[in-house]
Amino acid sequence: QVQLVESGGGSVQAGGSLRLSCAAFGYIPACMAWFRQAPGKEREGVATIASGGTTDYANSVKGRFTISQDTAKNTLYLQMNSLKPEDTGMYYCAARFGYPCTASQLFRYWGQGIQVTVSS
């Protein structure tokens, strides 16, 4: 069983930064990701990271967001810089076993979500 707990959300002005954390408990899958869901919109993949360190990003966040993990601490991070109002939404940590490690795949394990609000 895998349990994921997010932290680090909040409110920030446009252009600001936030760092999300996701503590993982249990057996840690090889593929971890961040998703987000804005009000009235479908959930979308933001970034993924495989156990070997390979990362993938949505076009909308490339160059602004960085996904990383600290395997010693079993923690996943999402550093978000140059935030825009359209980055507002609930952010979810997710994990899956197996490959490929992309946001289009089915993720079995999810955190409870954390709110990020970017004001203009």
Image (tube, rainbow, N blue to C red):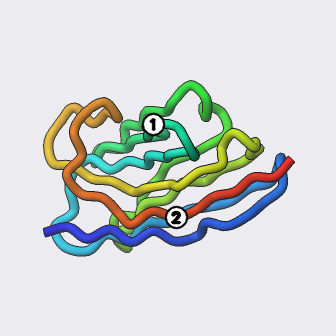
Q: Residues within 10 Å of mark 1 (few under 14, many from 20)?
A: few
Whole-number angstrom distance, CA of label 1 to CA of label 2: 16 Å
Numbered disc in front, either 1 or 2: 1
In this rendered view, identify the residue nearer to me: 110 or 67: 110
Q: Is residue 118 above or below residue 73?
A: above
Q: Earlier in the sequence, mark 1 or mark 2?
A: 1
In the figure, is residue 73 to the left or right of 85?
left
The residue that appears at 61% across and 53% down in the rendered structure is: 79
- Tell me where residue 14 appears, x and y as whole percent: 83, 48
Q: Is residue 77 above or below residue 96?
A: below
Report the quarter where the N terminus lies.
bottom left
Kind of element beneath mark 2: strand
Q: Residue 114 has which mark?
A: 2
Q: Residue 106 has which mark?
A: none
Rendered image quadrant of residue 106: top left
In the figure, is residue 18 to the left or right of 76?
right
- Tell me where residue 33 appears, x and y as whole percent: 38, 47
In this rendered view, identify the residue nearer to me: 40 or 95: 40
- Tell me where residue 100 appears, x and y as whole percent: 22, 31
User: Mark 2 and mark 1 in contact (Cβ < 8 Å)?
Assistant: no
Q: Residues within 10 Å of mark 2 (few under 14, many from 20)?
A: some
Q: How many marks?
A: 2
User: What amino acid is found at the position of numbered circle 1 in the picture?
Assistant: Glu
- Tell me where residue 4 appears, x and y as whole percent: 32, 68
Q: Residue 42 has which mark?
A: 1
The residue that appears at 52% across and 71% down in the rendered structure is: 7
Kind of element beneath mark 1: loop
